[in-house]
Image: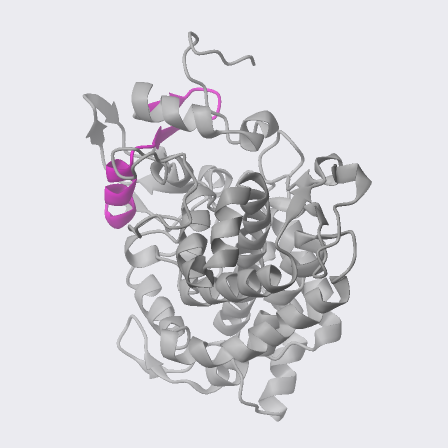
Amino acid sequence: MSITETSPVYFDPYKPEIAVNPYEIYRRLREEAPLYYNEDHDFYAVSRFQDVERGLQDRETYSSGRGNILELIKANAEFPSGVLIFEDPPLHTFHRGFLARIFTPKRMAPLESKIREFCVQCLDPLVGSEGFDFIGNLGAQMPMRVIGMLLGIPEQDLQAVRERADAALRTEAGKPMEVNQSNYAGESFEEYVEWRVKHPSDDVMTEMLNAEFKDEKGVNRKLTREELLVMINVLAAAGNETTNRLIGWTGKLLAEHPDQRRLLVQDPSLIPTAIEEILRLEPSGPFAARYVTRDVEFYGKKVPQGSVMMFMIGAANRDEKRFRDGDRFEVNRPRFQHLTFGYGIHTCVGAVLARLEGRVALEEILKRFQDWEIDYSNAVMSTTSSVRGWDALPVFTKGAGGGKLSSAAQ
């Protein structure tokens, strides 16, 4: 479909051509169709910051109990206990509370030295080369090694774990995700759990095995084996996906804005703010869907009970009523609340770790490479309707010694 300024705005989460460059459609949705209805796939969408923020916080009207992806809600799929992003209170409350005790800033801060070590191991061999792949050489490596370290997964198995997590999200271009409840079950981690039962260690998996808590029925207990396997599966997938995409968008945005990259080289103290700006502009999950539990009204129009509401996080994060010049990339932008990690009870429990990994990765990249250009002929966007990012983002670089860009990049 050809979309022009004079035609009605059209948004389809399955259109690859829209996913590549959705920004003008985001703007038009906010301005022309703040409540949007897609007849082809039968869902509603809101795109203004205030509407998305309010909706994500209203758990009683917008339920996560049927999932947060359009295809899952439409399929009315049932998922095993422990997929907390697909749960409502009270079940969600105790599962999230359990994980929140692990992913605190105090618990994550000591990981910085190990994260930095992983980055050094990935990047040092690339110094002096003509280029590298932000995904293949770093994004697909460091985050998985970190989550593997936390969960006690042997390094030789990490590639297979990452590939399973990626496969669960991949779709054929232009088509909805195939609903497969087994993707969330976590049986593939049974062997690691059994090993940890016999060989306790100082890692998250051991803590999850032994921790006691009060569940939604007020019973003091430990996690069931099913809950444990499901949670480990969720952590392994999310721990890989979020930071992997963040690293890819970091490479792309800083390549396209060399003035902003130079600011970071000159003043590395801006890097944490730059990571927030990258997260704001390019969220790995650009929309979150919910099941509507009661009739609601937006802008004089009714959204009936039983509908699917899509909250357009990618559009809301650029809303100029919230962010001055919202489409502009500014590494020194004053920090305001964005919605990339969600809002309300479903705010991402691993956000502290993702921010830490993103900051350390960018610090280590800029120590070695101050200039790069994207090899667009070999860059590949991921084919998924739920996560937006890069499967490959190769760049041409200037080496640490200040060498010239390769001839292909000039």
Q: How is the image coloured?
A: one colour
Residue at (61%, 80%) from the top-left corner? 152
Position of 402 compared to 88: left or right?
right
Residue at the location (57% across, 39% down)? 256
> 363 or 301: which is nearer to us?
363
- For image coordinates 34% across by 62% down, the residue present is 92
- Residue 287 seen anywhere in this rendered image of the structure: yes
The quarter holding residue 159 reads bottom right
Q: Position of residue 219 (x, y in %)?
A: 30, 80
Q: Nearer the viewer, residue 133 or 340?
A: 133
Q: Closest to the observer: 189 or 319? A: 319
**Magenta residues (range):** 36-61
On screen, 366 above or below 375? below
Q: Quadrant of the N terminus?
A: top right
Q: Position of residue 384 (x, y in %)?
A: 59, 40
- The C terminus, quarter of image: top right
Residue sitting at 70 percent across and 72 percent down? 121
Toward the top, the furthest residue is 6
Up-down relation of residue 92 to residue 330 (above or below):
below
Locate residue 86 relative to residue 132 in the image: left or right: left
Q: Is residue 42 visible?
A: no
The answer to whether 402 appears left or right of 331 in the picture is right
Please determine whether, in this image, residue 385 is positioned above or below residue 396.
Answer: above
The image position of residue 286, as x and y in percent, is 45, 41
Q: Position of residue 217 (x, y in %)?
A: 28, 72
Q: Nearer the viewer, residue 292 or 340?
A: 340
Relative to residue 165, is residue 205 depicted above or below?
A: below
Indicate whether residue 299 is drawn in magenta: no
Q: How many marks?
A: 0
